[in-house]
Amino acid sequence: APVRAVAAAAGVGVGTIYRHFPTRAELVVAVYRHQVDACAEAGPRLMASSASPEAALRAWLDLFVDFLVTKHGLAAALQDEKVGAALHQHFVDHLVPVCADLLAAAADHPRGGAGPTAYEVLRGIGNLCIGAGRDPQFDARRVVRAYVSGVLAEARRE
């Protein structure tokens, strides 16, 4: 979206946007970080409010899938390796621990137990979501639900 449209939607002037985000890339990075943080913060809330740990995990993964489908390839689109690496690290630092806690609770074993690691699970989901936003016949949430059922079955088996 043009910066002018972003400013109008935010109810501020273009100058205000540029004062806080001197480049388009900085604005995109800020939005990305905000959305990663919001996804991370949703994990504990869902754990506290869901009917079961598995329900919390599945609800959180739906949020994660929605995020991925709309943001997949963002770092590459910025065409800056340092920015991409920083975004990836922010993603790992904030989302992997939340996923690990939810997986452990849903599988009913201590964190770091059997089955794939949270990082492996999130990478697998990321791979499942590639291109999903461009293919109306592909329901990423449904595929991820089946994948997570297998992950949980494997974790509970060991």
Image: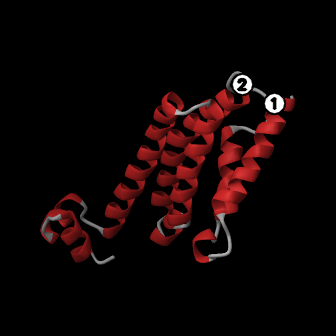
User: Where residue 90 sits in the image (x, y, percent)?
Assistant: 48, 46
Residue at horizontal 66 percent and vertical 43 percent from the top: 119
For the N terminus, the quadrant is: bottom left
Cβ–Cβ below 8 Å for labels 2 and 1? yes
Q: Secondary structure at mark 2?
A: loop
In the displayed image of the protein, which residue is found farthest to the right?
A: 157
Compared to residue 7, the image places residue 48 above or below, namely above
Query: Is 108 in front, or is 130?
Result: 108
Q: For the residues marked 2 and 1, what is the alpha-carbon distance in whole angstroms?
A: 7 Å
- Residue 97's image quarter? top right
Compared to residue 96, the image places residue 137 above or below, namely below
Instruction: Give the labeled residue for mark 1.
Output: 156
Residue at horizontal 87 percent and vertical 31 percent from the top: 157
- Residue 152's image quarter? top right
Crowding around mark 1 (Cα neighbors within 10 Å: few <14, some 14 to 19, many 20+) is some
Which label sits on residue 108?
A: 2
Q: Earlier in the sequence, mark 2 or mark 1?
A: 2
Query: Is 68 in front, or is 60?
Result: 60
Residue at horizontal 62 percent and vertical 31 percent from the top: 53
**Image-based side of 143 in relation to 29, left or right:** right
User: Where residue 122 sits in the image (x, y, percent)?
Assistant: 65, 48
Residue at horizontal 66 percent and vertical 34 percent from the top: 103
